Amino acid sequence: MRLAVLGLGLLVAGVTAGAGGGSGGQRRGGEGRRRLHRVQHGQCSYTFILPEMESCRPAADQYGNVNAAQRDAPPAEGEWSAQKLQHLEMAMENNTQWLQKLENYIQENIKSELVHIQAHVVHNQTANMLKMGTNLLSQTAEQTRKLNVVEAQVLNQTSRIEIQLLENTLSTNKLEKELLMQVSEISKLQNKNSQLENKVLVLESQHKTELEDLREEKQQLQNLVVRQATAIEALEKQLHVASSNNSALQRQQLQLMDSVHRLIGMVSAGSGRCKDGTTSLARILEKFRDCAELYRAGHNVSGVYSIHIDINMTEPVKVFCDMETSGGGWTVFQRRFNGSVDFQRTWKEYKMGFGDPAGEHWLGNEAVFRITSQGQYSLRVELKDWEGNAPFSHYDRFQLGSEKQNYRLFLRGYSGTAGHQSSLAPHGTSFSTRDADNDNCVCKCALMLTGGWWFDACGLSNLNGMYYTVGQNIRKLNGIKWHYFRGPSYSLRSTAMMIRPLDF
C-alpha cells in the first residue's frame, strides 16, 4: 500500500513538473530553486523532490544564445508554440521514463512485499493452525482418554453382565435338571403311591374278614382272661393260706430246734458219749454257713433253708438256696419275678433285708457282707426278658464292704452270655438308696432311677428298679435294666443274684 501511494505521488509530481516547465521559461530568472512535493496519507507523510526543468532547456550556441538564428529577432508566435510543444514532449518523455522506472520499482517491491506478506500471513496462519491443531489434539486426547475410560467401564460392566448371564444360565440349567429330576421322582412316587393304594385296597379287602375273625378271637381271649383271672385269684388265696401254713410250720420247726438244742445240752451234761443215735442227732443239728455247705451235706433240693452266718449268732437266717443252677449250692440274696414286693426302700431296710425268701426279696447288705467275709465267693446274675431269653453274668470274685464302707462292691473276672462286657458297676462303687446318696453323680440316682443299687454315675444296670409288666416295659429308664443285654430302657421280667464259695 505504501508503494502504491509513493508511485501515485511521483506521478503527480511529474505532471506538475511538466506543467511548470512551460511557464518556467517565462519566469526562469525569477526562481531557480528546487521544487518539493509533500503528500499526506493517514498518519504518514511523503515528500518528493521534483526534477528541475532548466536541465531540459536546449543547448546554447557559442555565444550563449539559444536560438542564434532568431537572437536578433523577436520570436514569432508559431516558434514559441513549437518550442513549448517540444518542451512538453520532452517533459512527457521524461515523465514516461520516470513512470516506467517507478512502475518497475513498484512491481519489484510489490512482489517482494507480497512474498513477505504472504509468507507472514502463511506463518501466522500456520501458527494459528498449529495452535488450533494443538488445542484440537489436546481436546482429542482428553476425549480419547475419557472415551477409553468409558470404554473400559463399559467393557467391565459388559463382562460382569456376561458373567452374571453365564452364572444365571448355569443356575437355570441346574434348576431345570433338578426340576426334571424332581418331576421324574414325583411321577415315580405317584406311580408307587397308586400301586400302594391299590395294594392297600386289596389288603383292606383281604383283611376285613381276618379282622372280623380276630375280633371274635379277641372276645374269646378276653373271656378266657377273665376266667384265668378268676382262677389266679383263687390260686393266690390258696397260696396265701399255704404261706400261712408254712409260717406255722416254720414256727413249729423253730420250736423243735429249741427242744433239740435243750436235749443236746442235757445229753452233753449226762453220761458223756452216746451210741449211734446220739451221733446222728448231732449231725442233724449241725450249723451251716451257706447253701454250699447244705448242698455238701446232702440237701440238693432248691428251697428255703436256715443258715448261721456267724457261729456266735444264735438266731439263724432264712435264705433261698438254688441247688440246681450250674451245679447248685447258690445262696440267693436278690430275687424278682412278679413285682409283688416294693423295692423302694430306705438304707436301713436294704441293710437288714426285706421280702419273703420263698418269693421276691432282698436278703440284706449286712448278711451278704458277713457271708462274703467268711472266704472267697463268686457271683452269678440270672436274667430273663419277656421274650423268653435267659442269659447270665458270672464274676469269679465278689465281696461287699462293711456299712462304714457303704457296702462297697468288689468284683473280678467277668464272663457270661448277658453282654460282651459287664453291666454291673465298676470295682469300688458304693451302695446308694433314696435316703443315702453315695453315687458319683450330682443328681440323686436312687430317686431318679428308683430302688437301692450300686449306681456309680447312674450307670449301666439297676435290678432293683420299678417292675413293669409286658407291654409297659419299653422305654423305661427307671425299670429293671441290664444295659449290655437289652439296652438302657428295657425292663426285664425276672432276675436273681446268688453267691457261692469260689472253691465249690
Image (cartoon, grey):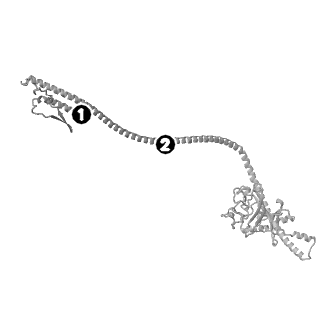
Above or below, comparing residue 504 to residue 278 in the picture: above
| Residue 393 in sight | no
137 left or right of 351 in image: left
The mark lying in front, picked from 1 and 2, is: 1
Q: Residue at x 12, y 23 (%)?
A: 82
Give residue 411's position: percent from left, percent from top.
76, 63
Q: Nearer the viewer, residue 497 or 135?
A: 135
Residue occupied by mark 1? 3
Tell me how far mark 1 sits from mark 2, CA to CA. Answer: 69 Å
Give residue 473's position: percent from left, percent from top.
71, 57
Helix, strand or loop under label 1: helix
The image quadrant that residue 359 belongs to is: bottom right
| Residue 254 in sight | yes
Q: Residues within 10 Å of mark 2 (few under 14, many from 20)?
A: few
Give residue 102's position: percent from left, percent from top.
22, 30
Q: Residue furthest left?
A: 73
The image quadrant that residue 369 belongs to is: bottom right
Above or below, comparing residue 338 to residue 38 in the picture: below
Q: Residues within 10 Å of mark 1 (few under 14, many from 20)?
A: some
Give residue 88's position: percent from left, percent from top.
14, 26
Q: Nearer the viewer, residue 74 or 157?
A: 74
- Residues at discs 1 and 2 in contact (Cβ within 8 Å): no
87 left or right of 209 in image: left
52 left or right of 324 in image: left
Q: Quadrant of the C terminus?
A: bottom right
Q: Residue furthest front?
A: 62
Amino acid at circle 2: Asn
The image quadrant that residue 454 belongs to is: bottom right
Amino acid at circle 1: Leu
Tell me the number on the disc at residue 156. 2
Q: Nearer the viewer, residue 497 or 6?
A: 6
Q: Residue at x 73, y 48 (%)?
A: 214
